[in-house]
Amino acid sequence: MQAMSTDAGHWNARYAEGRDRWDLGRSPPILDRLIAAQTRPRRVLVPGAGHGHDALAWARAGHRVVAFDFAPLAVESLRRRASEQGVEIDVREVDVLDPPVGLRGHFDLVWEQTCLCALPPEQRRPYLQAMAQVLGPGGQLLALLWAHGNEGGPPWDMSPVVVEQLLVGLFTVDRRERVAESIVEREPEWLWWLRPLAR
């Protein structure tokens, strides 16, 4: 499974077979609080967007959203949902390890949930490097990460110790907090506010 984690066919098959158990059918409660705290429209990237519950939540609140996913079925699903809800989202079938060059330095904010934990260990740093590159000056990566403490994956354990090691030389931690509003199946979760180091 590790070798297929960035393979579009692998993820597309999981959607086709209904093996997308990571999908909660809605955005997480903590996201509503974060969106409500924004004081101006942002340019937001949602990588590994899946069916797009989080991307739709950002877009409904008036933010300019780009959503990436490996899987054509996920891209199709999100485009359909956005159209049905009358919400504008730029949905792209993209390898999250290799975002389009034209989007470098473009975003104010990257919203990370369930993408980092789905990647095999050797692809985590390249992914974080790619996310650092798409953020503009003053931009932040907001990451909701599940510290389940189990071996193996995906989803892989994103404990604070693991995350701190991944961030060395790439991001500084502005803040982190344990999430009180997590659903029981995903406790404990941590919310991270991360800022790319000067390039």
Image (tube, rainbow, N blue to C red):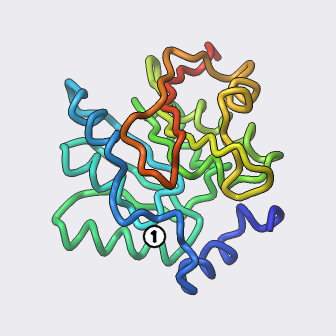
186 vs 3, nearest the viewer = 186
Q: Where 113 falls versus 174 (above or below)? A: below
Q: Depth check: give the residue in front, 49 or 181.
A: 181
Query: Total of numbered circles in the picture?
Result: 1
Residue 84 in the figure: left or right of residue 50: left
Rendered view: 192 above or below 153? above
Is 94 left or right of 29, judged from the image as shown? right
**Above or below, 44 relative to 115:** above
What residue sits 18% from the left and 67% below the top?
Answer: 85
Residue in the image at 24% along x and 57% along y:
88
Q: Which residue is mark 1?
A: 75
Q: Where does residue 32 sit, x and y in percent of width and height?
A: 26, 41
Q: Quadrant of the C terminus?
A: top right
> Furthest residue to the left?
86
Residue 3 appears at what percent x and percent y? 83, 64
Local crowd size for mark 1, using a 10 Å CA cut-off: few (<14), some (14–19), many (≥20): many
Amino acid type indicated by mark 1: Val
Q: In the rendered image, which quarter contains the N terminus?
A: bottom right
- Residue at 45% x, 24% y is 139
> Does residue 20 sit above or below 5 in this rendering?
below
View extreme (bottom): residue: 17
Q: Residue 51, percent across and down?
A: 41, 67
Residue at 45 percent across and 70 percent down: it is 75
Q: Looking at the picture, tell me which residue is in the foreground, 195 or 155.
A: 155
Q: Quadrant of residue 161?
A: top right
The image shows residue 36 at horizontal and vertical percentages of 21, 33
- Helix, strand or loop status at disc 1: helix
- Residue 132 in the figure: left or right of residue 87: right
